[in-house]
Amino acid sequence: MKNVIFLLSIISTLFACQPNANDEAARLAAAKQIVLDSINQAQIIAQKQKTIDSLKMVSVKTALAKKRSVEKVEKDNPEPMVGSVSKSKKGMNNTTKGALIGVGVGAVTGAAVSKDKVQGAFIGGILGGGAGAGVGAAVDKKKKNTNKNN
């Protein structure tokens, strides 16, 4: 009887020390999920950087266009101007303003509402920007129609 109990304790110890196949599968699935999450995070960061770069490019192009218009005015009128010079500043249209405001509000709202803050901010920014651009375009169209009638 002592031998049977001794043998059963050795067998149970050996089985208890071996890793469970379910635990190994769970660890493997968790590792895969971590890799996928890091890839998604890298894609989000790349998309944000792409947006930032495009906004910088737009601001550079706008600055160059303003500089060229000032140079053209100076070439066309070589005489020095006395008094104040008013440069016509066009500014942003309502579509652009609406898109920028929508991106900001959407990103903040998406981050506040979502469990995954980065993904929520990204998706909220995209949706907010689209909605803001749509509202701004409608305002621009209405102003254009009003100006045509007057």
Image (tube, helix red, strand yellow):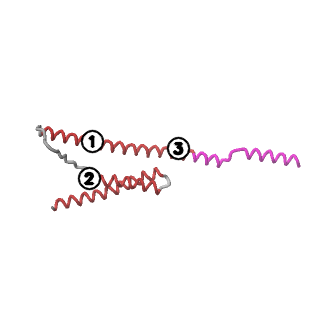
Tell me which residue sits at (19%, 41%) in the image.
70
Please determine whether, in this image, residue 140 is positioned above or below residue 48: below
Query: What residue would you read off at disc 1?
Result: 61
Q: State the separation of the CA atoms marked 1 and 2.
A: 16 Å
**Structural distance between the alpha carbons of marks 3 and 2:** 43 Å
| Residue to which mark 2 is pinned | 93
**Three-letter amino acid code at the position of disc 1:** Lys
Please state, as top left, top right, bottom left or bottom right, where the C terminus lies in the image: bottom left
State the separation of the CA atoms marked 1 and 3.
Answer: 39 Å
Q: Quick one: label 1 or label 2, which is nearer the N terminus?
A: 1
Residue 78 lies within the magenta run: no
Q: What residue is shown at x 18% (from left), y 38% (from top)? A: 71
Q: At which x and y percent is residue 91?
A: 25, 49
The quadrant holding residue 145 is bottom left
- The label on residue 122 is none
Observer-nearest of 90 and 103? 90
Q: Earlier in the sequence, mark 1 or mark 3?
A: 3
Element at badge 2?
Answer: loop
Tell me the amino acid under the disc marked 2: Asn
| Residue 97, horizontal then vertical, whole percent | 30, 53
Q: Earlier in the sequence, mark 3 or mark 2?
A: 3
Check disc 3 and report the residue beneath it: 35
Q: Amino acid at mark 3?
A: Val
Task: Tell me the SS state at disc 3.
Answer: helix
Q: Residues within 10 Å of mark 2 (few under 14, many from 20)?
A: few
Image point (26%, 53%), residue name = 93
Which of labels 1 and 3 is toward the front? 1
Q: Is residue 18 magenta?
A: yes
Residue at image point 83% right, 45% down: 7
Question: Which portion, as a residue range, is magenta?
Answer: 1-30
Q: For the residue carrying disc 3, how many other residues have a C-alpha within 10 Å: few (<14), some (14-19), or many (20+)? A: few
